[in-house]
Amino acid sequence: MFSAKKKGRKNPGKFSETLQQRFEGKFRVTPGCWPWTGSKTLKGYGQLRWKYNSLVASRVSYELYVGPIPEGLMVRHRCDNPSCVNPDHLELGTAADNSADMVQRGRHNNGSLAIQRGLSK
């Protein structure tokens, strides 16, 4: 793992932490899900800033504790909890796999909200 070091700063410790150290300070370990306690997206997915980039917390967890994410695959939550970063709850899949899970688990937008809001006209 690499570490970010900035020279000439008054607080060098802030910039010498590794990505793993920064990541591990942002969630709670529980017997089930490991809820992300840092910043979240509007949809509840954990996110953190690292070297001027915004990273998805579940992807960072997968890469730190499981391994690299091959091109064309995404990290999916088996637990259906978008803020969970427990690597045992994460798996790789395609966008099609993710969509199929969404329909199978009843998390898809079947248009009822659009009809209620009058957007289907």
Image (cartoon, grey):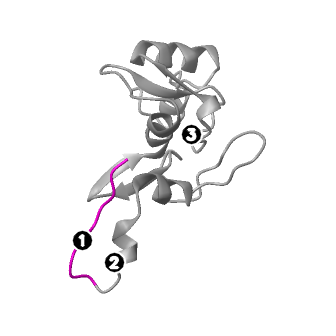
| Cβ–Cβ under 8 Å for marks 3 and 1 | no
| Cβ–Cβ under 8 Å for marks 1 and 2 | yes
Q: Secondary structure at mark 2?
A: helix
The answer for how far apart the CA atoms under marks 3 and 1 are is 33 Å
Give whichever of 43, 21 is nearer the camera: 21
Identify which amino acid the numbered label 1 is placed on. Lys
In the rendered image, the quadrant that contains the C terminus is top left
Q: Position of residue 116 (x, y in %)?
A: 54, 34
Region rendered in magenta: 1-9
Residue in the picture at 66% in, 30% down: 79
Of the residues under marks 3 and 1, which one precedes in the sequence? 1
Q: Residues within 10 Å of mark 1 (few under 14, many from 20)?
A: few
Residue in the picture at 50% in, 49% down: 46
Mark identifier at residue 82: 3
On whether residue 2 falls in the magenta region, the answer is yes
**Could you tell whether 82 is left or right of 71 in the image?**
right
Residue placed under numbered mark 2 in the picture = 12
Of the residues under marks 2 and 3, which one precedes in the sequence? 2
Residue placed under numbered mark 1 in the picture = 6
